Every structure is written in C-alpha cells, then in structure tokens.
Amino acid sequence: MNKNSNFSRINNCIDALKKLARTGWMQRGIPPSITETVASHSFESATIAGVISNILINHGYNINMEKTISMSLFHDFSECIIGDITLFAKENLSGDEKKKALELQIFSDIFKGYNKILEIYEEYSIGKTLEAKIVKLSDRLSTCIQAQRFYDNGYENVKDIIVNTKREVDEILKEFDSEIRKDILNLCQ
C-alpha cells in the first residue's frame, strides 16, 4: 500500500476523531452538543505540551519541542478505531499493557510507511523519554482543565475526574523541582 492510498484511511480517522465524544464526559451527563471530542482534546493537549516544553527549556532542560507537540497530537489517534476507553473500563477489562499493545498495532497499521510518525508514537507508547512524559502530563492537565470547565458550568458529576487527574499530575510532577512544578501548575489557574 502506498502512502497516498493510506492517507485516505488517515483522513477517515481524523474525521472520526473530530466527531468522537470523550466517553468519560458522556458517562457523567455532559450533553453531546457541548462535550469535548477526542480531536479537540488532542489539540489542547498539544498546545499544553508546547507550553510545558517551553517552561522546561527556560529552566535549562534539553527538549525537542516539535517532537513533543507532534507526539501529543498523535497520542489518542488509535481511538478512531477502538474508541475512547475510560480508565475504569481499562482497569476492569484487560489492563493498560494490552490496551497499549492494541493501540500500537492499530497506529502502526494506519501509519504504515510513515516511519517518523511511527517512531514518535512508539516513543510515546514506551513513555520513558522526557518528551513522552510531557505528553502524558499535558494529557492529564487537559483532562483536568476540561473537567474544571464543566464543573464551573454546573456539571458536578465530573468532580472525581478533577480529583483523580490532579493526583496523577502531582505524581508526574514529583520528578521536577518546586519552581518548575509551580510554573506548570499555574497553567491550571
């Protein structure tokens, strides 16, 4: 299969992600007309990843900001095939490793022949590099920020998402000094 014929499938996935509502919001009663889609979440996550990268660069870290932003844009791309699986479902069905393996397999099939994109996604999937950790952090921050938006608009059923994502953010931020943690947490204000 050549890259041009593969792009038709990529384009179909983009269309699906623009329409696919994030499951956690729907389960908590957020109306479809205002809920966040996977594509809008990916865009916000990528923006946050760029800002966090810049903060860390300003603190002397050596980060490939472009890679981090790209990685963040692609981090949920497999959901165009498998859907947005909630944390609860993931924990109670087959676990994180099986989900990651399935996502990598699907992503590799969709982006066959696009080696640099595959390389970036594999790096994210492994999760060991600073860029991959920034993407995980930006994903959690985006979710927390969106939950706070919904909560502020009267959707109190999202409180557990706020609490859980803040806990995850705090855990990720432990590897940074207090000044960096403060700078990053100020993004949520």
Image (cartoon, helix red, strand yellow):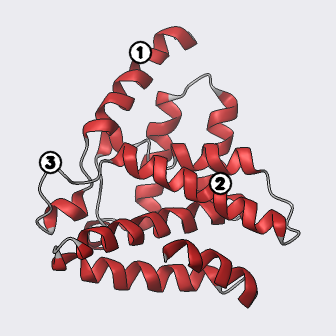
- Element type where label 1 sits in the image: helix
* 41 to 15, vertically: above or below: below
Residue behind mark 1: 8
Residues at marks 3 and 1 touching, judged by CB atoms closer than 8 Å: no
Residue behind mark 2: 50
* Alpha-carbon span between mark 3 and mark 1: 27 Å
Q: Earlier in the sequence, mark 3 or mark 1?
A: 1
Give the residue at x 48% y 69%.
141
Callout 2 amino acid: Gly
* 117 to 137, vertically: above or below: above
From where the camera sits, is residue 129 visible?
no
In x, y percent, where is residue 17?
33, 38
Residue behind mark 3: 33
Q: Earlier in the sequence, mark 1 or mark 2?
A: 1
Query: Which of the 4 image quadrants contains residue 112?
Result: top right
Query: Which of the 4 image quadrants contains residue 86?
Result: bottom left
* Alpha-carbon span between mark 2 and mark 3: 28 Å
Return the residue found at the far bottom. 178
Callout 1 amino acid: Ser
Give the residue at x 56% y 13%.
3
In x, y percent, where is residue 186?
58, 78
Give the residue at x 63% y 35%.
117
Q: Residues within 10 Å of mark 2 (few under 14, many from 20)?
A: many
In x, y percent, where is residue 106?
44, 38
Callout 3 amino acid: Ser
Residue nearest the observer in this picture, 122 or 51:
51
Residues at marks 2 and 3 touching, judged by CB atoms closer than 8 Å: no
* 154 to 21, vertically: above or below: below
- Element type where label 3 sits in the image: loop
Q: Residues within 10 Å of mark 3 (few under 14, many from 20)?
A: few
- Element type where label 2 sits in the image: helix
| Nearer the camera: disc 1 or disc 2 | 2
